[in-house]
Image (tube, rainbow, N blue to C red):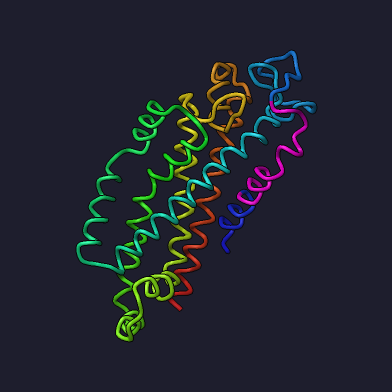
Amino acid sequence: MSLAGKIGLFFVVAWLLAAIFGPSIAPHPVGAVVSPDVFGAFSSAYPLGTDYLGRDMLSRILYGSRFTIGLALVAAICASVTGTTIALVAATAGGWVDELISRLMDALISIPSKMLALVMVAAFGSSVGLLILTAAVSYTPGAFRIARSLAVNVRTLEYVLAARARGERLPYVGVVEILPNMVNPMLADFGLRFVFVVLLLSGMSFLGLGVQPPDADLGSLVRENISGLFEGAPAVVVPAIAIATLTVSVNLLIDSFSGRTGRVAEN
């Protein structure tokens, strides 16, 4: 793995550990006002400063990372699994089934993800389940297009044609013959879906339409402390840096895996 890949892996593992164990090791409860100083600077007592109410930002970020990473991970898994499954059905069936599914996905992918999210929240209100569903629906067509292009290429290979010739059913052909040869590219695409979902949910939270108080994710931490921007408060900068390190590290890790896969294929 390249140096950039190792750096990405380090930060990805660190953020996963923070999402899993963060609330357990947070020095203060998530909503506890612990300091009379609002927008406090870095200090030994509060390593990441305090927010607009005097709450510890380190504790807020450790709690918020669980929402950001957890929601994005679940939504990305749903989008990738759903898109890949539909793509296998379309590629193995072919004909009018493939054409119908492809046109439906083309129509869905033409809707901007942020616009779809705004419409869904306006219609049904903001909730964790709705955010996951909206993100999954928004990015399923993209996963479908990648998976279908891979499946269409694989289905013309000799071993797939041999499986069809010996009378194997379409589910067997799709799951046993085609899917294993799509795993590596789809894992890379899954990482991209995760990054897209993180940015979508953070953007929604920044607009006040994402995770609602008393809970908070990294995007809402930026929004609620935006008034401290002109003071250069850590409460504004730190959550933004957290989002940046999370998304960039995932991209570095994906690029490293993609490069390694390409070199193995060339050999």
Residue 146 in percent (x, y) is at 35, 58
The outermost residue toward the top is: 36
Q: Is residue 264 above or below residue 202?
A: below
Residue 157 in percent (x, y) is at 32, 79
Q: Is residue 98 above or below residue 252?
A: below
Most foreground residue, 66 or 266: 66
Left or right of 148? Residue 76 is right
Most foreground residue, 231 or 225: 225
- Quadrant of res 112: top left
Q: Is residue 13 magenta?
A: yes
The residue shown at (45%, 71%) is 180
The residue shown at (44%, 27%) is 125
**Magenta stretch, main secondary structure class:** helix
The residue shown at (49%, 48%) is 194
Left or right of 211? Residue 123 is left
The residue shown at (32%, 83%) is 167
Residue span colored magenta: 12-30
- Quadrant of res 94: bottom left
Q: State which quarter of the image contains the N terminus.
A: bottom right
Left or right of 158? Residue 193 is right
Residue 126 in percent (x, y) is at 47, 29
Residue 8 in percent (x, y) is at 58, 52
- Total number of numbered discs in the rendering: 0
